[in-house]
Structures are given as C-alpha cells and as structure tokens.
Amino acid sequence: MSIFDLSGRVAIITGGNGGIGLGITQALAAAGCNVSIWGRNAEKNKSAAATMASSPGEVDTRICDVSDPASVKEAMKATLDRFGRVDGCFANAGIGGGGRRAFIDRTEEEWRKMFATNLDGVFHVFQVAARHMTERAEAGDAFGRLVATSSLASLFGTARNEHYAGTKAAINALVRALGVELARQGVTANAILPGWIKSEMTAGIMANEKFVANVMPRIPARRFGEPSDFGGIAVYLMSKASSYHTADCFVIDGGYTAF
Ligand code: NDP
C-alpha cells in the first residue's frame, strides 16, 4: 500500500468549492480520502462535488460561513454525523484585499471583515477540529492534521494590503504555536504559502497586462500556479508520511521568493 493512500481518512476543506481549495479537495479525494467541502455557496459546493463523482473518496458538502462560530459548529456536527470522524482540517477559505487603498484610508469595516474571515475563520474551524482530534487522541487514536492556507503576503511587505498581510502572518504564527502544543497528541499543524495562483481571487489582476509583464519575469517557473499544484502537498500533509513534520510553513510559488 502506498504511504500516500488516504483510504478511510476524512478531511474538511473550507473554501474547497473553488480555486486552491478545490485543487486540494480533488487530490485528497483521488487518494481515497473522504472529503467535506465547507463553503457559503450551495451551487459552487454542488459543482465542485460533481468534478469528483468518480473519485475513490466520498464527497460531502456543507454550507458554512467560517466567520460565524455557530455555522462552523453546525458544519462540524453534520460532517461527524456523515463520516463519524475527522482526521484533517484544511482551513483554506479566505478573501483577498479587494481594491487596495492607503493604510490611512483603511476603514474599520474592511479591517474587521478581513480578520473575521481570514483569521477568525481559521480559529473557529481549527478549534472544533482540534477538540475532536485531541479527544480521539485521549481515547488512543492519535492522528490529526491542521493545515491553513497562508500567503507570501505574510513574508513580503505588500503595500496597501496590510490587513490581508496581517491575517496571513498571524496564521504562520498560529500553526507554529499549535504544532508545538499538539505534537504529543499526534496532531500536526502547518501552513501553505501560495505564490501567484490562478483563481477567482486573482482573475482580475491576472487580466492586467502590465501586472503580468511585471511579475512573470520574477517567477522562475515562468507561469502562474494552478490549483492542482497544491494536490501533492495536501496529500503529503494528510498522510502518515508527514507525521514528524509540524509547525512549518511551506512556500509553493514556482521559485518566486528565492529569486
Ligand atoms: P477563491 O476566491 O477561488 O476561493 C476562496 C474560497 O473561500 C471560495 O471557495 C469561497 O467559497 C471560500 N470562502 C470565502 N469566504 C468564506 C467564508 N466566510 N466562509 C466559508 N468559505 C468562504 O480564492 P483562492 O483559491 O485563490 O484562495 C484560497 C486561499 O488561498 C485563500 O485563503 C487565499 O487568501 C489564499 N491565497 C491565494 C493566492 C492566489 O494567488 N490565488 C495567493 C496566496 C494565498 P464560497 O464563496 O462558497 O464561500
């Protein structure tokens, strides 16, 4: 049996109905993992599930707003009712900076919305998942995977986007702290830091010729990333092969940061 066989495992993927989250979900389902997509949009959830109809892993979908703790608790209960267990939690849902603006013009509303989705959302889903995983560890079944989608914005100074960068830098610190706290219970915590990836979030900026002409020469791989570029890391992190790999931040950017 392959060390990357995920048969019998169960993973939640927030924002698993599109973009990077769908790339993660499809790879997990193809490796035999049962997956539960948590997203706000029922139609997007349904279309995403349809792309995995012939995958070995079963696909479940839940309407969930990660910024709302009650919605997250409800989705967790429904997922546990369906599969009986949760082994992995990919806190991937996020919103982008939208129209960038000077820090001195940042509104309270924009700041709060960003943190409510990108950071509070990770807190809510990681907490329900970690409670379940640590309870199982106490019962003798020590296995858990917490994975959050961060960003290169957590490393670079991204002007006029400080609210987004702040949420992502906090995610890096969060997984390092959780990786240390939960290691003895067999629960790992890591972050994935994507570079420039094609998705609904980046469609607008990638349609801008000036942006492409400026950024492409700085990407050694000479292409934007695809959601499918996140399948390998997701399967690795979900598998037994990554048991000793925790509290880390994985940069997936075609070499952008190193160049
Ligand atoms: P998309 O816009 O394609 O996907 C975002 C997903 O998040 C959607 O599936 C959306 O589903 C979900 N979502 C948003 N808000 C909520 C919410 N409140 N509750 C539940 N789900 C929510 O973008 P990407 O795939 O690009 O982004 C995925 C992650 O990757 C984000 O965290 C983003 O910050 C990060 N990232 C992306 C990069 C890129 O270049 N694309 C670069 C660096 C990081 P629904 O609308 O149904 O709720």
Image (cartoon, grey):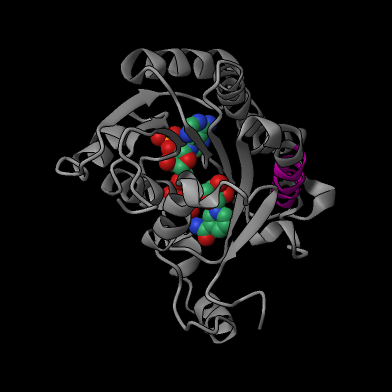
Q: Position of residue 120 (x, y in %)?
A: 67, 30
Q: Position of residue 222 (x, y in %)?
A: 47, 83
Residue 52 quadrant = top left
Report whether residue 95 is seen: yes
As drawn, which residue projects farthest toward the left?
54
Question: Does the magenta-highlighted stretch encompass residue 199?
Answer: no
Between residues 21 and 137, which one lies in front from this camera angle? 137
Between residues 257 and 115, which one lies in front from this camera angle? 257
> Which residue does the image show at 69% across and 59% down from the upper left?
153
Q: Is residue 3 left or right of residue 190?
A: left
Question: Does the magenta-highlighted stretch encompass residue 167?
Answer: yes
> Which residue does the image show at 75% across and 65% down from the upper left?
156
Report whether residue 116 is seen: no
Image vertical order of residue 29 relative to residue 205, above or below: above
> Which residue does the image show at 57% across and 27% down from the upper left?
125
Magenta-drawn segment: 165-177
Between residues 180 and 65, which one lies in front from this camera angle? 180
Q: Is residue 96 left or right of residue 20?
A: right
Q: Position of residue 116 (x, y in %)?
A: 66, 30
> Which residue does the image show at 20% across and 44% down from the upper left?
55
Q: Position of residue 103 (x, y in %)?
A: 81, 51
Image vertical order of residue 229 relative to residue 64, above or below: below
Between residues 255 and 93, which one lies in front from this camera angle? 255
Which secondary structure type mostly characterizes the magenta part of the structure? helix
